[in-house]
Each structure stands twice: as C-alpha cells, then as structure tokens.
Image: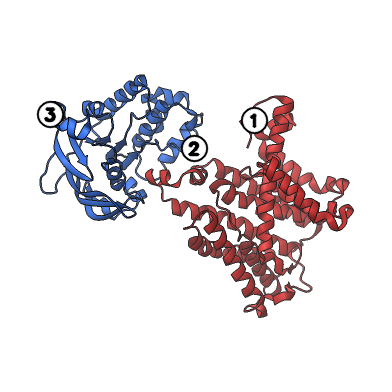
Chain colours: A red, B blue
Amino acid sequence: MNKSTSIFSKYPIPIFSLVVLSFPFWFEYIGGYPGLDTKILIWALMALGFDILLGFTGYLSFGHAIFFGVSAYATGLMLKHFSPEIIPAMFIAVIVGTIMAFAVGYLTMKRSGIYFSILTLAFGEMLNSAALSTLQDITGGDNGLTIPDVKPVLFGIRMDGLSMYFLAAAILILGYYLARRIATSPFGLILKAIKSNQERLEYTGIDVQKYKLGGFVISAIYASIAGSLMVIYEPYVATEYLHWSTSGELVIMSVMGGVGTLVGPMIGAAFMLYFENVLSVPLGEEWLLVLGIIFMAIVIFLPGGFMEGLARIKKRYFNKSNKEEK
Amino acid sequence: MSDTNGNSFFSVKDVHAYYGESYIVQGISFDLNEGEIVALLGRNGAGKTTTLKTIARALDPKLKQGEIYLAGQNLHDMKTHEAAQAGVQLVPEDRRIIPGLTVEENLIIAQVAPNIGWEIDRIYEHFPKLAERRKQEATSMSGGEQQMLAVARALARDVKLLLLDEPYEGLAPVIVHEIESILQEVKKLGITTIIVEQNAVAALKLADSALILDTGKIVFKGTAKEVLDNKELREEYLAI
C-alpha cells in the first residue's frame, strides 16, 4: 500500500490511466459485467468535477443533477432529431449545461452554507418538475425521453461496448489531468482559500464572487459532459437524471471517497455503483440498509472517507508521514 | 499631516461608520502626505480598528457617510477587492494568513489581482526566513513569522497605503524588536502608513505624526513628539 501510494503521488497520471484503461479487462473477475464499467467512469467524471466545487471551495451543491440532467436531455434531443453523430450532440449539451451553470451559479453563489445548498436544491426541483409537466412534450414527461433506433456514432464508428468505454476513459483521464492542474494553479489556490476565509482574499484584491462562480461553472461542465456521455452510452433519458436523488448520490459518493482529494470521490463513485449493481445481488433486498450502515460508519469513524482510510493504513503499517498525499 | 483643502495624497472626510446599529466612527477627517506614517491611538473601543476596516472598505463596518480619497481615487464607492486593487493593504490583527496554504502559496495568491508590487524573489531576498519556510504551511509558523509574512504579502502588492492593525500584539518582546526593525525598513520605502497599536510608545517611535481617537472622534492631531511630550494627553487618552 505504501509503495503504491507513493508511486501514485509520483506518477499520478500514468498510474491513473493504467488503472482506467485496464479496468474492463479485470473488472469481470471481481463480479463486474460489461457496461457497468462505462457507467462507473461516467459517474466518476461527475464526482471528480463535483470535488472541484465541494472539495476546493466547500460549497455543497444539492443541485448538480441540473447539469447532468439538462445536458442529458439536450444530448437525447440532438441524437433523436439532428444526427446520431455525437460531437454536435455533446457540444450543444455542454453549451446548454454551461449556460445553465452561469445562471444557477450567479443566483445561488451569493449565499453560502445551508442557504446555498437549499437554493441549489430548489432550482433542481423546479427544473425537474418543469421537465415532468410544462416541458413534457419535449422531454417525454414521466416516461423519460425515448430515442428509438438511434445508434450514436463518433465519426461513423458505433459507440458501444469497448469503444464507448474508451471514449469515456479518454475523457475521464483528460478530466483528471485538468483537475490536478487546476488544483495546483493560482486559480485552485484561490478556490481552496475561499473555503477557509473569503474576507482575507478580498483584502488581497481578489474578486471572490467571480472565482466562486468560476469554480461552480467548471464543476458543472464536468457534470454536463457526464450527462451527455450517459445518454450516448444508453440512448434514453431517464427522469431520475434530473431528480434530486442524483445530486444526493453524488454527495454520498464524494463523502464516502474523501472530499477534496479528487481521487477519493471517483473511488466513492466506483464503490457505490459496484455496491448497487454487484454486491446488492447476494445481499438481496437489504442492500440499501447495508449501504446506509457503511455510509454512517464512514462518516462517524472515517470522516475523510476511503482516502483517509488508506492514509491511516499507510501510517500504521509503514509508519511514514502522509504529508505528500492528496 | 496637512489639513489643506483636499489635495493630499490620502484624505478622509467626515467619515461615519456603523457596525449594525452601533455608531462607532463618528465623523472623522484627516489628511496624509505621501510617505507619511501616522500612529492612530486611543483606548480600547475608541474605534481605531473600525477606522482601518472602513478605509479598507470591509463589508462590515458600513460606511454610511463620508468620503475617502487615495491618490485621486475615491475609495468610498469601492468594494473590498476594488480598494485592495487601488492600493490599500490592510494587515489585520489576525494577520490574514490563509490556512491550508504554504508561505509561497500565500504570496502567489497576493499577486493574482492587479497591481503587483515586489516580485516573490525580491521578497525572499529581504525576508530570508520566509524563503527558508516557503513550502511550510503558513499558519504553522510562529506569530512573529506570520506577521512577517503578512507584511511581505502587503509588499507583494502595489501598496500605496499600508494599514497595520496592532502589529506587535501577542508577540514576545524579542519578536516585537524584530518586527520593529522590519517596519523601520518598510518606512524607508516611503509607503504611506497608518499604524494602530495599543503599545503607543512603540507606534510613536515609528510614526511621524499621531492621531488620538476617543469614542469615535478625533481629539488630537499633531506630531509624534507632541504626544510623547504631553503628559496630560497621554494620561487622559492613552493611559501611559
């Protein structure tokens, strides 16, 4: 463990890429099945982006389903009515998600703490109910948006199975690389400083509001790309994509994995999906109960999530400082 | 200190500031020449820190009336970050070190917004202690070192008006000495400075002139020497 984590802090991108790219070839030996791996990457991408907001700035959004969902609908509509080619669909989806992020972020980021969380939740619920009622002619209402007989392609190559997996993998690796770059850039430092003290930042001439909005929009763009990929992977828009429970799951993944560590929330996402889809089979109907107990145990005993668990194991058995971790 | 009609480098005109309903700064006016160092003195609760925060355009206290000009720019219409970009640098009592960031990261952040002062390398030349600790988490340093970093951060920006709030507070006498010599160095740079300090004697050593505040009003304006020579004044307002 010590060895692998210290190697990881030395070569994070190559090792991360290696794990992600080899994943579908060993996943089945631990009970996984084709398709679930792709879904894990998509959720990991969203959790990664979410960490740029929650982990860096400390702003807990309960409305990230907005960007995932809106982008999913946009992608679905593009694939259905425009072309099965995914580039225009993703492009439009991300634009729509970004515009949404500016609007929601501008209105909610002026508040902090619980008020911010509640505002984002309220926005999410508004959009969700709009999609199910007012806009049901476009969104398909309670049935979700069905996209019959459309097979998404990238430059004519059918996006399914492994090709879909590697598309998601390439985007996730790029996303991870960029997130790390952001973390060490002055922009990232400012986001982290926002978490500890906004007033002090103002005294150094920084327009905090602008940077907060920037962090929010970047994290929403990750969610938009994830939402778009989800519909390309499975050409159907489920109503739950826009539902608050999607936002809630994202929060749970982040907390379980380790907020502010970038890798942690991705591990959290993988764990959640693995649990929901693989471990739930032997556990039967009680699986949600077990998941709840695990979640509570983590919050109580390991507030830093899986990443803190790894750091503790490393410290106990190898007695080495875990300072350069993260 | 010049009380001429508004052509000073820095001037405060009939400023009134409130914390919520509490009326703290009750109409103060003064002017500073470029490069002048003034000690802002008075008892606890006289409104010294509130005056500094008002000048730095903090969100709280609220400036309800009055005008503040720095080098021709009107600070009274600005927000906190705009005032900082205009050249106001507040080194507050709590030293404004940002937790979770290293010494170097604290300096980097100070140079994101315009306008930039000293390059980081130049800061390290002047403050070799900070260079040694560049990778250390800033809040894990001693109080004196944090104060040093706070002053260095102000110099990292294009500072036109330096506001020092109790720079010696909570520091051991030896460290006070060290910070004093740093501030003497800063004085040589010719930066216009307002220093608030409980330790009036230490502040007056540094200052050219002095202002004494009492319950939100200025009760004395003069040179530093006049305060030191006037026993009654010292006893009435400063208890020294």
The disc placed on residue B99 is 2
Residue receiving disc 1 = A322
**Of the residues shown, which amino acid type is indicated by label 3?**
Asn
User: Separation of disc 2 and disc 1 at Cα?
Assistant: 19 Å
CB under 8 Å between discs 3 and 1: no
Q: Mark 1 lies on which chain?
A: A
Residue receiving disc 3 = B230
**First reached walking from the N terminus: tag 3 or tag 2:** 2
Can you say whether A69 is above or below A317 in the image? Answer: below
User: Separation of disc 3 and disc 2 at Cα?
Assistant: 43 Å
- Disc 3 is placed on an element classified as loop
- In the rendering, at what x and y percent does residue B109 appear? 44, 40
Q: Nearer the viewer, residue A268 or A16?
A: A268
The residue positioned 70% from the left and 60% from the top of the image is A229
Q: In which quarter of the image is the N terminus of chain A?
A: top right
Q: Residues within 10 Å of mark 1 (few under 14, many from 20)?
A: some
**Of the residues shown, which amino acid type is indicated by label 1?**
Asn
Looking at the image, can residue B9 be seen? no
